[in-house]
Every structure is written in C-alpha cells, then in structure tokens.
C-alpha cells in the first residue's frame, strides 16, 4: 500500500474512529474538561528556525494513495477498449455507487467540479440579469461559474469562527433578481444549512451546495449535497476523492438531473441507445467524465471511509491540543455538523494574542522550518481586480444598467472575510492521514514557535 500507515495500526485506528467523530458539542465538553499540555517545556526546546532540531523531521503521508487496485481498474478499461462513457459501464457504475454513498436519488458525473457547478447553474436556468449569492472565502471556480452564466455574483461576508458564509447575512442580500444560493462547505466543514435552507424555503430559491471539498461530510446525519436542491463535488488531484480530474452532481430532483445529464453530454437526452439526436431546449456542452476516471473513482472510493475516519480522529485531537495555545483558533463547526470531511485543517493565527510581534508570515516560515508546511489560504475573492474587468466587459455592460455595475463593489464589501484572509492558516488533508505522533509533532512545532515568538519575529 502506498501509505505511511502500517496496516495493523491503520485497522486499530479505524476501529476506534467511530467514537472519536468530531462533534462540536462533544468537543466543547472535552475542551471544558481541559487536558494537560503534552509539551511541557517548549520554551526549553530551540526552534528549528533558530538552529534547533525540527519538530517533524520526516515526511507526512504521501498523496495520492493507490496500489494494485487502481492498476487493475485502469488496465480493465484499457483492455475493454471502451474508454468513452457512452460505450462503457464504469461511469454509470460510479454514478450509482456515489448516489448510494451519499444517499442521493440521482448522480450525474462531470469532467470536473467546475463543470458540475456550471451544469447545475445552467440547468437551473441561472443566466443574464440574475444574481447568485455566494461566499467570498472559496476557490475561484465557485465565482467563475456565476460569471460564465453572465449572472451577477453577490458575496456575503464570512463567519470567521467557522470560515463559512455568514448565513445570518444572506436574507438581507436577497432581491427579486436573486436566482440561486451557492454556499460552499469550505475545507469540508459544513456551512450553516439550517439557516440557509430556511431562507431558501421562505424566498423560494434553489440552493446549490458547492460540496467540492466535502465528500461524506454530514449535516444532521444527512450527507451534504442532499440537503439543498443539488450538491456539486470535485475529484481533482488534491481532493480527498481523487481521479486527477472529475466531478459529480447529486440531486433528488429527477427533472434537474435529466437537464444536467443533457448539459454535460452536448444536450442529448438521457437513456438513449447509440446516438440520440433528441435535444432539450437549453444550451449545453461536452463536460463528460471518461471511463478511466470512472474506474479510478470506484477504486479510490474503497479507501474514502477509512481515510475520512482517520482525518476526523486526528483533527479532533489536533483541535483539542491547539485550542490550548493562545492565538490559535481552530475553525468551529456549527451544531448541525455531524461529520466534517476535513479537506483542510484550518485555524486562525491571531498575532496580537500569540505575542512577540510575530506575523503570520513569520509564523508560517518558522512552522515550515519545523517540518510542518502551512498555507495562508485564499485571498479575498470579492476584491479580485479581474471581477471589475469582467463587469466592464461588453456582455456585462449590455445586460446590466450602469448604476448596478457602478454600485457592485460597495454592495460586495466583506470586511470580516478580508480579516479572515489575513489570519487563516491551513494544513492540507493528507497531513491528517498519518499516526497520532504526526499530530503531536504539529502541536510541538506550534508550541516551540509560540514560546520563542519574539526571537523568531526578529529573525
Ligand atoms: C476544487 C473546487 C472546485 C472546482 O473543482 P475542479 O474539479 O477543480 O474544477 C469548486 N469549488 C471548490 C470550493 C473547490 O474546492
């Protein structure tokens, strides 16, 4: 197996993982009970950036994880001679398996997550003149699909505690032109779906869940993507379920599933044998997944549950330990969260509470020297200069009154999100796949940097 976790240890870990599922309420009681810091003398240990020994000298688990299972799957497609989903069985099989896994009525595979979102917004007839409500703390694809449909993006400020859209602020931004809500479960941490669905029901709006980082994450026991009108997933190389590229939409709405299916297949109707030239009354494209990817996803899916449990268990432990360090604020989960997919382990670095005058950039550099690579994550999407260029383009100027475009920036200010972007620190999902000792090393690294913040700030 291409993984750093020995099999015996892996199985042992998986057996206890069910009990350790991170629930916010449970975590809160653990935190209240308190626990002794494992590193008692961080102050006495010299940080690697100041010439000491790194807290984590080795590697974190490699990504992707694969073995003969994937090799056989790919060889099977090769020798079948059917590499296109129209002839083969693998993409259909994957769609059925993914629907079963998520508890969805329908699943339509797409070429990637961007295509899943694009097909869904298009099938919902979101278009020129419409407004789409989304989070500014997300990957650029969430925005691109709105712009591809010539709709107007309306950003809602973030809740810095959770790193998610501040759902309490959505309703005030709804207008008669709002065509869809597009919340993201960023990092695999579910957005506040109770509040989002309440607004959606009262204002009669479809909800497209961008679940491109949230495979098997759950809200009140239901898989995310099945709570809203549709849920979109990505299987790109960095994602927890990986086929290099790939995507899928799940929905309970049969008509919407048919429209999405046609959209990803150049408008051909579903269930056609051979070449169907029966077309729907909509725009369309070729956004199909290949049999190679379908076969890869079926193989990778056999690892998803165990990997997800390991991530959850390690993340819960990490949160417990890191929460004891002043100035480190792990992302919180809403009470409805029954499972976090942990595509990212996210926390805020608060320089003023951490002390020593250490900046986030200096913190991350010192962590890197300890052998714990960190990322600063997203920059504010709503402040991207390219959006102004798009809004100033010929198409947008034809569609929207000059006043609407002129007021867009003022209407889309997200100060809490801008602050969040300055404080965020991410660890990537594969760092959560190793043994408990890796988590202790991460905590040791943070404690060492914390204890020597002033010296490190001067380096
Ligand atoms: C990865 C991702 C996407 C797009 O998925 P691709 O498969 O890369 O096209 C969309 N939204 C979010 C939040 C993502 O993380």
Image: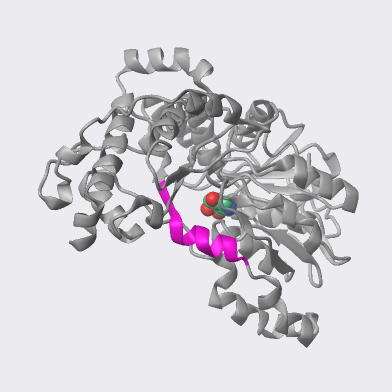
Which quadrant would the C terminus be assigned to in this image?
bottom left
Residue 74, given in percent of the width and then of the height, sits at 44, 34
Task: From this view, report whether residue 443 is shown above or below residue 157.
Answer: above
Q: How many marks?
A: 0
Residue 159, given in percent of the width and then of the height, sits at 61, 52
Which quadrant would the N terminus be assigned to in this image?
top left
* Residue at the spot 79% in from the left edge and 80% down from the top edge: 399
Q: Which residues are magenta?
A: 414-426
- Give whichever of 127, 201 is nearer the camera: 201
- Give whichever of 112, 307 is nearer the camera: 307
- Give whichever of 187, 248 is nearer the camera: 187
In the figure, residue 439 lies in which quadrant? top left
* Residue at the spot 71% in from the left edge and 84% down from the top edge: 406
Task: From this view, report whether residue 146 is shown above or below residue 81.
Answer: below
The answer to whether residue 307 shows anywhere in this view is yes
Tell which residue pokes out farthest to the left in this image.
51
Residue 24, given in percent of the width and then of the height, sits at 58, 31
């Amino acid at each position: 197996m291409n993984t750093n976790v020995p099999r015996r240890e892996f199985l042992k870990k998986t057996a206890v993982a069910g009990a350790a599922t991170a629930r916010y309420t449970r975590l809160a009681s653990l935190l209240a009970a308190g626990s002794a810091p494992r590193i008692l003398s961080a102050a006495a240990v010299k940080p690697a950036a100041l010439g000491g020994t790194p807290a984590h000298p080795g590697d974190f688990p490699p990504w992707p994880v694969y073995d003969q299972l994937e090799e056989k799957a790919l060889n099977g497609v090769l020798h079948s001679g059917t590499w296109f989903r129209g002839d083969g069985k693998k993409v259909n099989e994957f769609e059925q398996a993914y629907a079963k896994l998520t508890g969805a009525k329908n699943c339509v595979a797409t070429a990637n997550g961007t295509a899943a979102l694009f097909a869904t917004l298009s099938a919902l007839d979101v278009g020129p003149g419409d407004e789409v409500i989304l989070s500014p703390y997300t990957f650029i694809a969430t925005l691109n699909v709105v712009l591809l449909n010539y709709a107007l993006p309306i950003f809602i400020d973030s809740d810095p505690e959770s790193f998610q859209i501040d759902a309490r602020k959505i309703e005030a931004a709804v207008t008669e032109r709002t065509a869809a809500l597009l919340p993201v479960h960023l990092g695999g941490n579910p957005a506040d779906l109770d509040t989002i669905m309440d607004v959606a029901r009262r204002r009669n709006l479809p909800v497209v869940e961008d679940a491109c980082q949230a495979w098997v994450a759950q809200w009140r026991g239901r898989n995310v993507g099945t709570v809203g009108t549709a849920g979109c997933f990505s299987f790109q190389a960095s994602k927890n379920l990986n086929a290099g590229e790939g995507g899928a939409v799940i929905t309970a709405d049969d008509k919407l599933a048919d429209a999405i299916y046609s959209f990803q297949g150049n408008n051909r109707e579903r269930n056609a044998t051979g070449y169907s030239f029966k077309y729907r009354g909509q725009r369309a494209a070729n956004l199909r997944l290949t049999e190679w990817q379908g076969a890869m996803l079926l193989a990778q899916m056999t690892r998803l549950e165990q990997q997800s449990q390991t991530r959850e268990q390690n993340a819960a432990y990490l949160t417990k330990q890191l929460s004891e360090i002043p100035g480190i604020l792990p992302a919180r989960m809403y009470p409805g969260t029954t499972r976090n997919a942990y595509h990212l382990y996210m926390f805020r670095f608060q320089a003023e509470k951490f002390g020593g005058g250490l900046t986030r950039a200096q913190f991350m550099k010192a962590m890197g020297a300890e052998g714990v690579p960190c990322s600063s994550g997203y920059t504010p999407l709503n402040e991207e200069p390219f959006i102004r260029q798009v809004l100033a383009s010929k198409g947008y100027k034809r569609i929207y009154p000059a006043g609407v475009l002129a007021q867009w920036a003022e209407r889309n200010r997200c100060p809490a999100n801008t602050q969040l972007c300055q404080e965020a620190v991410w660890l990537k999902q594969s760092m959560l796949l190793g043994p408990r000792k890796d988590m202790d090393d991460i905590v040791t690294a943070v404690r060492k940097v914390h204890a020597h913040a002033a010296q490190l700030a001067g380096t």
